[in-house]
Image: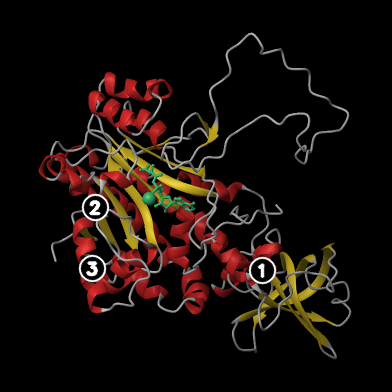
Amino acid sequence: MAPRPRLNALRGPLRTLHSCSRAAQAATASLALPATVASSLAAASAGSETTASTTSLNGWIRSVRRQKNVSFAVLSDGSQVGGVQVVLPKGLDESLTVGCAATLKGKWVDSRGAGQDKEFKVESVDFVGESDAETYPMPNTKQGIPLPVMRRNAHLRLRRDGPAAMVRVRSEMNWAMAEHFRRQGFVRVDMPVITSSDCEGAGEVFRVVESSPSSPAPASTAPASSPSPPEPSTAAHPPPPSRYLTVSTQLHLEAITSSLPRAYTLAPCFRAEKSDTARHLQEFWMLEAEVAFLDADTPTALDQVMTVAEETVRAVAGHVKAMPEIERYFAKHSPGLEERLEALLAPERYVRMSYTRAIELLQEHAAANPDAFVFRPTWGSGLQTEHERWLAEEHVKGPLFVTDYPSALKPFYMLPNESSWTVDSSRQTTTCFDLLVPSLGELAGGSLREHRLDKLVAAMDKHGLDRNAYEWYLDLRRYGTTRHGGFGLGWERLVGLLTGENNVRECTVFPRAAEGSRF
Ligand code: 4AD
Ligand code: MG
């Protein structure tokens, strides 16, 4: 296979501009906060805390096993997979119940039991917060806690190893992603959540309306005795434009890259998804990156954007793969995870194939295996998840970019493939891509953008869009337009891919999906 070009090796604007500073890490040392369970155990294991020194551990009790002269408890503060075993002499264990919060003072000693080198010998207990073990929703049971119970108790589920590990992985992903983009000279820009347009044109927007006196009041934390002053009358003004929760920050990010050529954001996006699938949330986080001054050659320009997406996935996956959470928790719960992570990090660049080629391959497979797919692959129809997964899992056995989808399936802003528009009008395609990965299907989608004013206006008319609502967007083509493009990547989907969680509801703490939420 051809060697994978590194991002830095690309021509022109994508060369590294900055190196990363680690100053932020040093700042934590000055915070006078107590050690975490993980850091205290690590210090003890490294020999820097001897049996002579008394130290404190804060956490929640996961289990208590009372014996004749001594009790064993497991204490956890979410800082590592698995809690730590603590040993309490008789009399000290009385206040401890499953779920309670406590500060234990004592010493690390070599453990005689299996599974843990050190255990914590408790000398005194500061009881912090009680817990009724009878009703505690997150007990340590051998058989685990059923998924519906975990989801109903999302506010407490981080007491369990898996959800806590997911949160730590996601936190590190954010860090690795930010460091990667910073190294590549991208600026991070925070984007508006309330917008005036449906960027994707799929009609999945949530409309923002002010609550009327008759609509139910949302739960309020404001004191009851502080009524807000009456709003001035707006009767004399024209009605304000409709407002929506953003489905994608792309159009605004394009505005940024018409001044700062490399920009990205990680922002919440909202889609009124009715479908109850393992891949869709109504509120999810999307990483979006946009680059200006792309190459004048269209396939090369699309390659540049795909390379940005690929390098981002690699940077984040490489960082996560080295986390102890993967080996100690996720790999044990998701067979094949480590191989899937290796496939994301393999030295060859990700396979790139056109939609037309993908359809041919799918059709050949369907002809030889009539029961392979529920949906028949046909040119002009979107790829179903089963098609995407077959391509990634069976055919490529790794990630792949599928490019140049039919124009009829795509939003107004994508740059058409001019050659396809002149050769065969029934097979018009756009310069776009989806990044497909095993066990999931679509992870990211991106494109080159129509940068020419007249063509963009024509595309908007064709899609029936109100030009007036997009005047600011058209300005970007009026005043110094450039060839530009970018992509969006579902953050929960990437969390799921890197941890082996196969439902995005487990990849965010408080999921909002079609079924609603009590939180
Ligand atoms: O493919 P999408 O719809 O692309 C866009 O919104 C572009 N405007 C992005 C861009 O070019 N800047 O969404 C991008 C990604 C998808 O590939 C998917 O991973 C994720 O966002 N996504 C969702 N994730 C969870 N729940 C949903 N309902 C999602 N919809 C999209
Ligand atoms: Mg898409």
Question: Looking at the picture, how far across and down is residue 247, in whole percent?
Answer: 48, 41
Give whichever of discs 2 and 3 has the lower sequence position.
3
Q: Is 97 above or below relative to 187?
A: below
What's the image's color scheme? Answer: secondary structure
Relative placement, left or right, of 181 versus 220 is left
Relative placement, left or right, of 229 versus 247 is right
Q: Is 22 above or below relative to 57?
A: above
> Looking at the rendered structure, which numbered label has been put on residue 363?
3
Q: Is 96 above or below relative to 254?
A: below
Q: Return the residue nearer the eye: 14 or 201.
A: 201
Which residue is tagged 1? 148
Q: Quadrant of residue 232?
A: top right
The crowding category of the residue bearing disc 3, from other C-alpha atoms within 10 Å (few below 14, some 14 to 19, many at least 20), is some
- Gap in angstroms between the C-alphas marked 3 and 1: 39 Å
Q: Return the residue nearer the eye: 181 or 497.
A: 497
- Gap in angstroms between the C-alphas marked 2 and 3: 17 Å
For this orientation, the residue located farthest to the top is: 236
Instruction: Judge depth for marks 3 and 1 and give the one in front.
Output: 3
Which residue is tagged 2? 403
